Image (tube, rainbow, N blue to C red):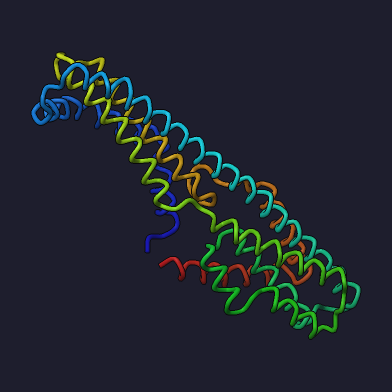
Amino acid sequence: TKPAAERQSLQTVWITAPYRATMFAIAYSAYPTIILFFRSIVPEAETGESTALISSFAPAISLLYGAWLSVTFSILEERTSSLQRTVTEESALLHALCRRTAKLVHANCLKEITEKEEALFAPIFEQTTILACRSREDELLAIANEDVYHRFDGALLKNSIFDAGITDLVDRLTATRAVRLTKETKSLPAAHFVVLATFSFQLLFCFIYAAALVPTPSDNSVLRVAFALFFSVNVLVFNFSLDLNDPFRGNYQIRRSAINANLIATRRIIADVIGSTRTRMWETELKDNITRSEF
C-alpha cells in the first residue's frame, strides 16, 4: 500500500496547471491522427445522416450529460455539506465531554492525578486522533474490537463517577458518530461515473465525427484547439466529480477549521489535566500505530 502522502499527491495532481496543460497538449497532438483514422474507417455519410447526428443526437446527448452532471454535483455537494455539519457537531460534543470530565476529576482530586483517573482521558485522546487522521476502516475496526466510548464508560465505573450530563454526552456522541459513518458510506457507485464518462465519450465522438466529414486539413489549427479544449475540460470535470466523491481526500474536502479548533482545545484540556509529557507519549504511540497501518 502506498503511503498516505503519496496517495494524496496522486489524488490532487489533476488540479495542477502542468497536468491540465499535458491533457491539452495530448489532445492537440493527437487530433490529426484521430481525424485521419476516422476518415479511413468511416464511409462518406449522406447529408441527411450527418445532419441527423449533428442536429439531433449530439444535442440530446448534451442535455443528458448536463442533467447527469447537475445531479452528480448536487448529490455530492449536499453530502459534503451534511458531513461538514455532522463532524463539526461531533468534535464539539467531544470537547464538551472532555471539559466536563476534567471538571469532575478536578473536583474529586486534590492531589496528583491517579492512573485510574488518567484512564478517563485516554479514550477521548484516541478519538481526537481518529477524527483527525484515521480512515473509516480503522474506525470501524476499532469500534468492533474495543470501542473508545465503551472504554470510557468502564473508566467511569472504576472511578465511581456517575454523572447524568456525561452519560448524555456519551449517548449523543455515539449517535452522532453513527450518523457520520452512515453518511460517509453514501458515496456514488462506480457505475455512476461510468455513465458520466460514457456521455463525455459520446460528445467527443460527435465532435470528431462532424470534424472528419468537413473537407478541411487534418491539422486545422482552429479545430485542433477546439478539440483540445473540449477534451481537457471533459477530463477536468470528470476528475472534479471523482474528487467530490471523497470528502476527506483530494482538493475539495470538508472545511476543517472549526473541527480542528475543537480537537486542539480538547487535547489542550487533556494536557492540562494529565501533563504534557504523558500526552506526548500517547501521541507518539498513536503515530506509530498509524504509520504501521499505512504500509
User: Which residue in the rendered view is the most extreme toward the left?
Assistant: 40
Identify which residue is drawn at 37% across, 24% down.
59
Residue 192 vs residue 126, the one in the foreground: 192
Q: Is residue 192 left or right of residue 258?
A: left
Identify which residue is drawn at 38% across, 48% down.
10
User: Which residue in the rendered view is the most extreme toward the front?
Assistant: 48
Residue 98 image-quadrant placement = bottom right
Residue 111 image-quadrant placement = bottom right
Q: Position of residue 119 (x, y in %)?
A: 73, 78
Identify which residue is drawn at 58% across, 79% down.
145
Q: Looking at the image, is 278 positioned above or below residue 42? A: below
What is the count of numbered marks? 0
Q: Is residue 17 left or right of residue 46?
A: right
Residue 67 vs residue 81, the one in the foreground: 67
Say which quadrant the N terminus sits in.
bottom left
Say which quadrant the C terminus sits in.
bottom left
Residue 293 vs residue 110, the one in the foreground: 293
Residue 223 image-quadrant placement = top left
Q: Is residue 109 left or right of residue 145?
A: right
Q: Position of residue 254 (x, y in %)?
A: 59, 47
Q: Position of residue 38 (x, y in %)?
A: 14, 29
Identify which residue is drawn at 66% across, 63% down.
177
Q: Position of residue 48 (x, y in %)?
A: 22, 18
Q: Is residue 212 left or right of residue 84?
A: left
